[in-house]
Structures are given as structure tokens and as C-alpha cells.
Image (cartoon, helix red, strand yellow):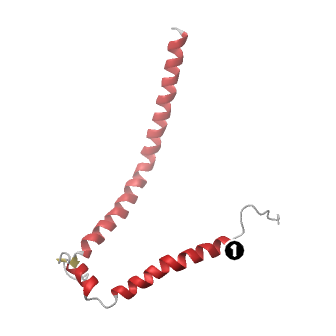
Amino acid sequence: MTEKSRSERGGRRRFNLKRREACTGWLFVSPALIGFSIFTFGSILYSLYLSFTDYNLLSKPNWLGLQNYVKAFTDDQYFYPYFGNTFYIVVALVPIVCWWCRCCWPSSSTKRRAG
């Protein structure tokens, strides 16, 4: 065997080992990822489906289509006040609280005294 073929084979062997370790890692992590995806995206999709129905937990969902959304934007007296409150919390209070926590929390660069 020549020196060149040994180095090529060794480089390829390391690549295969890295690839094998990566595949093993994904194999170990995949059950958690699959379970997390099913519970997360399944819940989101089911909520989206229920938003198009008339559903009260005691009977089967009755398909309404976009009527729920039309009612929310036109007839519902609580939609816009609740939307305004949510907008206020997200735009005003969250940045203020984040700033306050950042200012008041001791930074990691300060030295702490040992007990």
C-alpha cells in the first residue's frame, strides 16, 4: 500500500466514524423529538380544527367554517378589548420587565464571595 492510499483511507474512516456517531446520536434523540413533535404540532393542528367548529365538550364538533372568525371580528363585544390588552402586555410590559430584570439581576461578571 502506498502512503497516499493509507491517508485517504484513514481520512475516510474518520469521516465514517463521525457520520456513524452522528447517526447514533440522532437515533437516541429521535424518540424524544418524535414525541415532542406529535404532542406539540398535534395539539396545534387540533386547536386549529376546533376553531372552525362549534364544540362544547359534550357533543361532537359541528363544522361551521369561517363563521367563528367572522363573528369574532364583527359581532363579539369582547374581542377588541381583549386584543388591545394582549397587545399592551406584549408591546409595553414585556420589554419593561425584561429591562428591569436585566438591570436588577447581578451580572455573571461580578465576583461573589465564597461562604
Q: Is residue 4 above or below residue 24?
A: above
> Residue shown at 69%/71% (left/top)?
105
Compare residues 41 and 85 and report the one nearer the observer: 85
Label 1 is placed on what type of residue?
Cys
Q: Position of residue 94 (x, y in %)?
A: 54, 76
Compare residues 11 and 89 and report the one nearer the observer: 89
> Residue shown at 48%/76% (left/top)?
90
Q: Tell me the quarter of the image containing the C terminus.
A: bottom right
Mark 1: few, some, or many residues within 10 Å (few <14, many ≥20)?
few
Residue 23's quadrant in the figure? top left
Q: Position of residue 10 (x, y in %)?
A: 52, 21
Q: Position of residue 68 (x, y in %)?
A: 23, 80
Residue 82's quadrant in the figure? bottom left
> Residue shown at 65%/70% (left/top)?
102
For this orientation, the residue located farthest to the top is 1
Q: Position of residue 46 (x, y in %)?
A: 28, 69
> Residue shown at 47%/43% (left/top)?
25
Residue annotated with mark 1: 104
Identify the secondary structure beneath mark 1: helix
Q: Is residue 4 above or below residue 12?
A: above
Tell me if 84 is positioned left or right of 56 in this view: right
Q: Is residue 86 above or below residue 110?
A: below
